[in-house]
Image (spheres, rainbow, N blue to C red):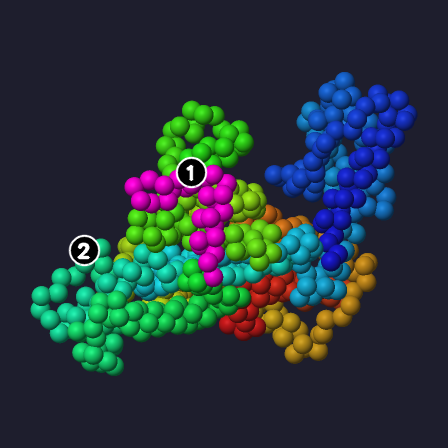
Amino acid sequence: MANTLINAKEQLRKAIIAAFEKAIESGELIKAELPQFIIETPAERKNGDLATNAAMVGARSFRTAPVKIAQAIEKNLELSGTCFDRCEIAGPGFINFFYSAGFYTSVLRDIESEGESYGQSDYGKGRKVMVEFVSANPTGPMHMGNARGGALGDCLAAVLDKAGYSAYREFYVNDAGNQIEKFASSLEARYLQLYKDDIVFPDDGYQGGDITDHAKAFAEEFGDKYVEAESNERRKALVDFALPKNIAKMQSDMEKYKIHYDNWFFESELHKSGAVKAVVDLLTEKGLTYEQDGAIWYKNKDVCTKLLLAEGKTQDYIDKLELKDDVLIRQNGNPTYFTADIAYHKNKFDRGFETLIDVWGADHHGHVMRMKGAMDAIGCNSDEFKVVLMQLVKLVSGGQIVKMSKRTGKAIQLGDLLEEVPVDSARFLFNTREANTQMDFDLDIAVQQDNQNPVYYVQYAHARICSILKALAAEGIEPRSCTDEELSLLTQSEERELIYHISEFSSEIISAAKEYDPTRITRYVTQTATLFHKFYNACRVKCGEESLMQARIALCLAVKTVIKNVLDMFNIDCPETM
């Protein structure tokens, strides 16, 4: 894909290198290895569109003051044929560069020619990336953390796809292990309590009303058939009845949330296939397990210590972590969740995924290091195991924290949220704060249809452009292709600022992909809307000069494309009227 901003930076890099070489050849600089310099956007764009520290970092190599190096670069710099028309030396030796009119014209040409593809790049080179997110416990309803994780994970996968990766969305269903045993014992108790008075509910059982609801529904269908059955038979029947209903509700909620997974992976399949046992055998073969008190333990402390030392951590730092070994197989012969998790992540790598990204709650931060260590231990690349840790989310209404649903009087679940809040609002708002920050989700703002609601604000900018074009069409004014000379008429500061901003779209997507942070894109498109409104208020689209009017129409169309491409990427509606 064409990208004027990226091309401009590459042009500038080559021009600076050529200027260095000419200065060396002429004797203005001594012969030395060229420095590694950066090209970046200045904090204050009034100082330049791009800037370089080439002279500053070259001082040692060329054994001269940075300002003299900058003067030599400026003297030998050839900007003809590039997107720049001048440069200035600032401070002790920074060099600031300014775009020519051709840059702004090229940006609008890119958007016009690429349309819905604008913003895409091949940065990821098709690399296969697995994004696993939500993966809620199927023994109960999904909660607000799952709502945030769902929006973050789905939009992160969308960003990765746009950046040229091949992203795959997966939900890991924990339908085996200790939580299912607890689910079974909880269901059993609630079922038996319908027929007997002396049934004690287990201390560690699931207390949710959904357990009681399942038990009642089971009794309505089967009556007392299982009251006198063997406990194992009764528990299996109850789980076989209730678990598929919970999973179906999860799948339904995710679809309603506009999240479409490529795969729902069931933990039980790992156990059936022997993958869990195989990973224990593999670790044993590598001398990383031992038996104690009838259980099989994994040498987590040794593995993580080795990993941390390789990362440059000191022994004192490691000692403060108080690392401990982990149980792989309990005394009763059942594997732990950690064991299945190792097998699952090995399975991901075995399926050909080159990078694994997990979206986890912040309470799992202690699990990250031991999983990284386990990946190295089984021969996988821990550097390609990435975790996005997500902080808590609090629901707020009227400035007060909300814990209960008005409809049910119970703790708010994902399903409740999606009944009260438009899906587009939820998806957008959950992506307005970085995952590593705590978030207050304001229910009042989420349902508002005004500029206080960020998604409405962005959607309105798109609808406003559609309205402008419709009004012009009613007067017989239709968009037409502009010449470069006409597009170069867009010289107002509001016009230039807006064009520069939309030139950054692809770069923003790449940065969001590199940082695993889709919130960069919601901030970007919100700023796009702000700059458009600023432009529209300062520059009349329907002006006296036809050429300038068509150039401004072209700019409106370009902004419309960028906003639509963002909203489409995040699977958010992009209305033409509001």
Is residue 368 visible in the rendered structure shown here? yes
Q: Amino acid at mark 1?
A: Lys
Few, some or many C-alpha atoms within 10 Å of disc 1 (few <14, some 14-19, many ≥20)?
A: many
Q: Which residues are magenta?
A: 273-298
Residue lying at the far top of the rendered structure: 63
Q: Nearer the viewer, residue 212 or 227?
A: 227
SS class of the residue under badge 2? loop
Label 1: element kind: loop
x and y, in percent, of residue 465 in the image: 61, 67
Q: In the figure, 559 relative to 19: above or below?
A: below
Closest to the observer: 452 or 206? 206
Q: Which residue is identified by label 1?
A: 299
Q: Which mark is residue 128?
A: none
Residue occupying the point 42% across, 72% down: 252
Residue 532: quarter of image: bottom right
Q: Tag 2: residue type? A: Asp
Magenta-colored stretch includes residue 288: yes
Locate residue 486: give its quadrant.
bottom right
Pick the quarter of the image with the N terminus.
bottom right
Q: x%, y% of residue 459? A: 53, 65
Of circles 2 and 1, which is in front? Answer: 1
Kindly give the residue lying farthest to the right in the view shown. Answer: 26
- Residue drawn at 82 percent across, 30 percent down: 20
Task: Report whether 367 appears left or right of 107.
Answer: left
Q: Which percent across, then down, holds residue 100?
A: 78, 47
How far apart are labels 2 and 1 at the CA level? 32 Å
Residue for point 75% across, 64% down = 113
Q: Earlier in the sequence, mark 2 or mark 1?
A: 2
Dot 2 crowding, Cα within 10 Å, few <14, some 14–19, many 20+ = few
Residue 203, labelled with which disc?
2
Task: Judge whether 218 appears above or below 299 on screen.
Answer: below
Residue 559: x %, y % from top left: 64, 61
